[in-house]
Image (spheres, rainbow, N blue to C red):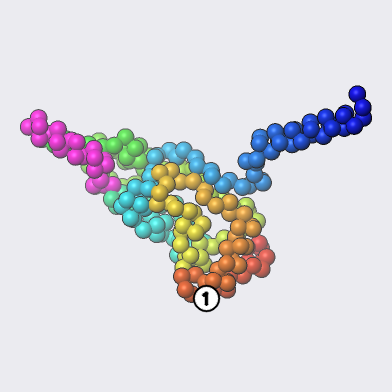
Amino acid sequence: MSHRIISLLLGIGIVMSLLLMAGRFGGARVPANQQGYEPVQPIAYSHRLHAGELQIDCQYCHVAASTSRHAGIPSGSICMNCHKQVKATFGVVRQEDEAATAEKRPRRDVMSPELRKLFTDLGLDPSKDLKEQQVTQTVAWTRVHRLPDYVYFDHRAHVNAGVSCQTCHGPVETMERMRQHASLSMGWCVNCHRDATKNGINGKRVNASIDCSVCHY
């Protein structure tokens, strides 16, 4: 076999190997890139239902977003503002109402399994009147968005400048389970700052700095 044929076969082998490696590692990410991260939470909380269907404002639950560096995880007491009364989905409540009417009996108090878990995790006894109880514990939610320790990010600066939650967190109102929408990489942030400085935010001119010391200190 001539050297020319051997070289050709080696070349084909190298190309095929590279193609296989590209297919296998095409989804590989740089360290700390958790784009698409969508952990199962201890309670199946639906942003689609709360932020989308019910149109609850993000800052009703994440109360610190406009006044603090961190948006904050909603406290159990915020959940109970509604769920002391709301213990099941509308569909489940309607089914019970229809069944009670058909069976000519008093309506029973129904409670969804996920809300039962919420009450228990908050230190509440779901078998007793929730209106007479106080939250004593917290839910061990799994954190979704986490920046490296050497990065400084301030929610209030962005919220007060008019940046929408969806700019960074994606279409939260459509997510059944929360996931990391953007890469949150340095390049992604820098490009957003450049675009904001060039085009403004909601018609308002801003100077979104790309100086290193703004995010790294």
Residue 50 screen position, x and y as percent: 34, 50
Residue 63 can be seen, yes or no:
yes
161, 25: nearer the viewer: 25
Three-letter amino acid code of the residue under disc 1: Arg
Q: Is residue 120 visible?
A: no
Tell me if 89 is positioned left or right of 60 in this view. left
Q: Residue furthest left?
A: 104
Residue 87 lies within the magenta run: yes
Q: What stretch of residues is rendered in magenta?
A: 83-105
x and y, in percent, of residue 162 in the image: 46, 68
Q: Position of residue 75 (x, y in %)?
A: 39, 51
User: Left or right: 164 with respect to 78?
Assistant: right
Residue 78 higher or lower than 141, as above or below: below
Disc 1 element: loop
State the quadrant of the C terminus.
bottom right
Quadrant (top left, top right, bottom left, bottom right) of the N terminus: top right
Q: Residue furthest top?
A: 1
Q: Pinpoint residue 99: horizontal percent, then vertical percent.
A: 14, 32
The answer to whether 108 is drawn above or below residue 177 in the figure is above
Q: Residue furthest bottom?
A: 205
Q: Nearer the viewer, residue 72 or 168?
A: 168
Q: Is residue 204 above or below residue 183?
A: below
Q: Which residue is mark 1?
A: 205
- Residue in the image at 87% along x and 29% along y: 5
Q: Residue at x 82, y 34 (%)?
A: 11
From the viewer's side, name the closer residue of 199 and 129.
Answer: 199
Pointer 1: residues within 10 angstroms few (<14), some, or many (20+)? few
**Which residue is painted at 69% across and 38% down in the image?**
22
